[in-house]
Image (tube, helix red, strand yellow):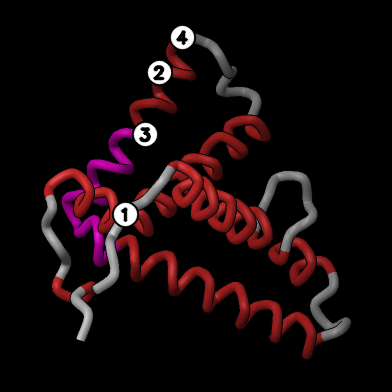
Amino acid sequence: MAVYRGISWTGFLLRFLAALVLVFATYNPEGYSYFHWVRDHLAEQLPLKLFAGVVLLIGWTIYIRATLRSLGAFGLFLAFAFFGTLLWLIVYYELVSVDNMKTLTWIVLVMLCGVLATGVSWSHVRRRITGQVDTDEVDD
C-alpha cells in the first residue's frame, strides 16, 4: 500500500509554473504569444499554428476541468473573489495605476495562474487538511 504524503510547496509551485507557461504562451501583453503569432501572421506556417493551438487547448482543458472539478462553482467564485478583491486593493492603495493597462494585465494573468494552480492542487490540499479523499482518487 502506497503512503500518501500530500502536496508540498514544491508541488504547488510546479503546478503554478506550468500554469504560467500555459497562460503566458497563450497571451501576454508583450506581444510574444500564440494569440499575437496567429493574429499577425495567420497564413504563415498554418499547420504548426494549428498544432500549437491544439497543444494549448489540451493544456487549458486539463487545467480548467481539474479546477472546476476540485473547486466547484462556489470555490471558483471564492477564488475569483479573492483575487478580484486583491486586485481592487492594489488599485485602491495606488500600488498600480489604473492607467497602466500593461501592468494590470500582467497582474490579472498571474492571478489567473493562481486560480488555475489552486484548482489543480486543491484536491491534494483538501485531503491533507481534512483527510477526505475524492472519489476519483481512490485506487482500484
CB contact under 8 Å: marks 1 and 3: no
Mark found first going from the N terminus, 1 or 2: 1
The label number, if any, that marks residue 5 in the structure image: 1
C-alpha gap between disc 1 and disc 4: 40 Å
The label number, if any, that marks residue 84 in the structure image: 3
Highlighted range, magenta:
68-82
The N terminus - image quarter = bottom left
Residue 124 in the image: x percent, y percent? 29, 55
Mark 4 belongs to which amino acid? Tyr
- Point out the residue furthest to the bottom here: 47
CB contact under 8 Å: marks 1 and 4: no
Mark 1 belongs to which amino acid? Arg
Give the label, 1 or 3, closer to the camera: 1
Mark found first going from the N terminus, 3 or 4: 3
Residue 63 in the image: x percent, y percent? 43, 65
> What is the crowding at mark 4: few (fewer than 14 residues within 10 Å), some, or many (at least 20)?
few
Q: Is residue 46 left or right of residue 34?
A: right
> What is the crowding at mark 3: few (fewer than 14 residues within 10 Å), some, or many (at least 20)?
some
The label number, if any, that marks residue 93 in the structure image: 4
Secondary structure of the residue carrying tag 3 is helix
C-alpha gap between disc 2 and disc 4: 6 Å
Residue bearing mark 2:
89
The label number, if any, that marks residue 87 in the structure image: none
Relative to 123, is 137 above or below? below
Secondary structure of the residue carrying tag 2 is helix
CB contact under 8 Å: marks 1 and 2: no
Residue 13 in the image: x percent, y percent? 51, 46
The image quadrant of residue 47 is bottom right
Residue 89 in the image: x percent, y percent? 40, 18
Mark 3 belongs to which amino acid? Gly
Q: Is residue 49 magenta?
A: no
